[in-house]
Amino acid sequence: MGTRPILPYDCDPAMLEPSYDPPLSSCALCGSAQLSEHDWDLRGNHIHRCRDCRVQFMNPQYSDAHLAEFYANYGWKDGEMCAAPKKGLPGSREMSKQRAFGLILKHASPGRLLTIGSGDGLELSVARGLGFRVEGYDIDPKIGAAIAERVQAPVHSGKFTEVPFDDASFDVVYMDQVLEHLKRPAEYLQNCHRILRSDGLLYLGQPNIGSISNRTKTLLGRLGLKGKRRGKHYASRHHIFYYSPAVLCRLLRRQYGFDILVVRGSLKPQANPVTPLLSRWFPNLDSGFLVLARKRKSSAMIAVEPNRLAGAQGAEAVG
Ligand SMILES: [Zn+2]
């Protein structure tokens, strides 16, 4: 264990040999047992699809031990936090965070805000600059402490469902590029619902498996035309669940007690100005999307207990 290499952001996936759980027999988002084989990728990971809620996911999934080791090194090198990966246009990360919190402020006043998976702390700094009272969360205590020191804000760590947040105590919960990494997304969505006040806002940003580009890659892979790059777009080194706007919005509405305020392509500045413009109305033109959802007033959420609800179908939220 102690001799495993430290992973930079863009490491060679072969550096860390994964271990796996037994395969899931029911959907971790809606509880349905109606699963089907959908695809496989260059790493030999199998991609399954729920025939009820239509979410796609790796199956079998990485073990908790593998993920703990992987994320203990995520964004770290030689005991120091790495600079964020330089992707996209200069300043695009900060710009996209500014735009995200600007969008939130169109629907709410600045209040108590929690960011989940707080990365290098940039989003906490940006949100605080716009007047939010910010707190962060990162599963790894070392990373959480480093972020807290860097941005001088409270950052919680440990198992998310065990952090002692009070019910209805946050105005906004923000998760950008996090949901696709989570092995137990239902636990996170349920807990976000619990800690948000009535009418509180949930912001979710993630890759779009339903984008035209990703659908084309899936099709070409299944036709055997992608060679050794088959399924690279699943990014299964660290992405476990694969959402489209339609699938995620339906789950949030039916299963998790939220109403959808905004669904659109990502807010990241792009060299091509046409995609961001059109993906505002047609999110599947972009490879990423966001959802801004509001906790339903008086919503009684359906309690999903994934893997124990084999056969449960079509559950609808009450209220
Ligand atoms: Zn499902």
Image (spheres, grey):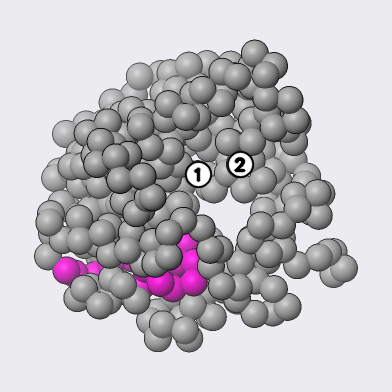
Residue at which label 2 appears: 235
| In front: label 1 or label 2 | 2
Camera-nearest residue between 173 and 255: 173
Q: Which amino acid is tagged 2? A: Ala
Q: Residue furthest front?
A: 272
Task: Please state which of residues 146 and 184 is positioned toward the viewer in this rendering.
Answer: 146
Number of disc labels: 2
Q: Which stretch appears magenta?
A: 110-124
> Which quarter shows the C terminus?
top left
In percent of the image, x 64 and y 40: which residue is there? 236
For residue 266: magenta?
Answer: no
- Residue 125 vs residue 236: left or right? left
Residue located at (25% from left, 77% from top):
129
Quick check: marks 1 and 2 in contact, CB under 8 Å? yes
Q: Quadrant of residue 247?
A: top left
Give the residue at mark 1.
180
User: Is label 1 in a helix, a strand or a loop?
Assistant: helix
Answer with mark 1 or mark 2, whichever residue precedes in sequence: 1
Quarter holding the N terminus is bottom right
Q: Is residue 189 above or below residue 111?
A: above
Q: Position of residue 8 (x, y in %)?
A: 68, 64
Q: Residue at x 47, y 29 (%)?
A: 213
30 relative to 68, above or below: above
Which residue is depicted at the point 61% across and 41% down?
235
Residue 187 drawn at (x, y percent): 45, 47
